Image (spheres, rainbow, N blue to C red):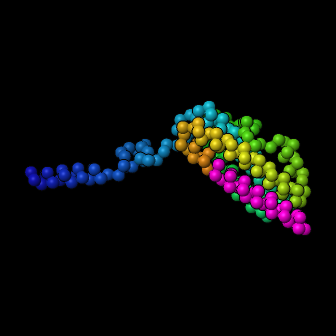
Amino acid sequence: MRRTLILLAVVIVLVGCQPDNVHTGSADFASGSPAPATAAPGSATETAFAKAMYAHHRQAIALDDLALTAPATSLEVQQVATENKRAAESDSQTLQTWLRAWGQELPTGDAGALGMLSADQVTRVQDAEADRFNQLWMQAMIARHRGAVAMAQQIQGSSGKQEVVLFAQRIVASHTEEIDRLHMMLANSATRSVQS
């Protein structure tokens, strides 16, 4: 009898010490791990944000490709374009996954995105030569980044999906940092032009 009570006590202790993130059933999520943002359809606001940001990132990739293939592009601009394209492609994939999981079509236009360049503005950048190309490209990216930051700030206060909010927070942080970087590059470029 005493041995039985001891074994029972050991079992109780072991069960009580089981980590919170261990569950029976393979379909359970670990405790503290948020469910994917795609687990339920996005709200109208979340869907509009995802579509606008997707369109915004697709234009970013096109402009990055332009900078990476134009003969007049400076090494600094090429570096920014390479980093920006890598991030934009990753974000585009995330947004595409969300939209498809929510039963939404991918946008074909600008989807109301803020900071988008018009076709004429893209042409101006594309046709510019030498230092003028680098200047216009950086100015265009600053304007576009400001639009992305504005959209990301708007969704942070209206989304109930943790992954959407975290995505928006990262956009604000990374794009604000790059805006500062591009401003510094423009200032340095202007200084070099004056000195030459």
In the rendered structure, the answer to whether residue 130 lies left or right of residue 165 reads right
Q: Going by the picture, which residue comes out furthest to the bottom?
A: 196
Q: Position of residue 179 (x, y in %)?
A: 72, 53
Task: Indicate the quadrant where residue 184 lies.
Answer: bottom right
Task: Indicate the quadrant where residue 129 lies.
Answer: bottom right
The secondary structure that dominates the magenta segment is helix
Q: Going by the picture, which residue comes out furthest to the left?
A: 1
User: Does 188 lie within the magenta span?
Assistant: yes
Instruction: In this rendered view, identify the residue nearer to me: 156 or 27.
Output: 156
Residue at 10% over, 53% down: 2
Q: Position of residue 139 (x, y in %)?
A: 80, 52
Q: Position of residue 150 (x, y in %)?
A: 68, 43
Q: Position of residue 132 (x, y in %)?
A: 88, 56
User: Does 168 lie within the magenta span?
Assistant: no
Q: Going by the picture, which residue comes out furthest to the top?
A: 44
Residue at 54% over, 37% down: 160
Residue at 57% over, 43% down: 165
Write down the region rendered in magenta. Answer: 172-196
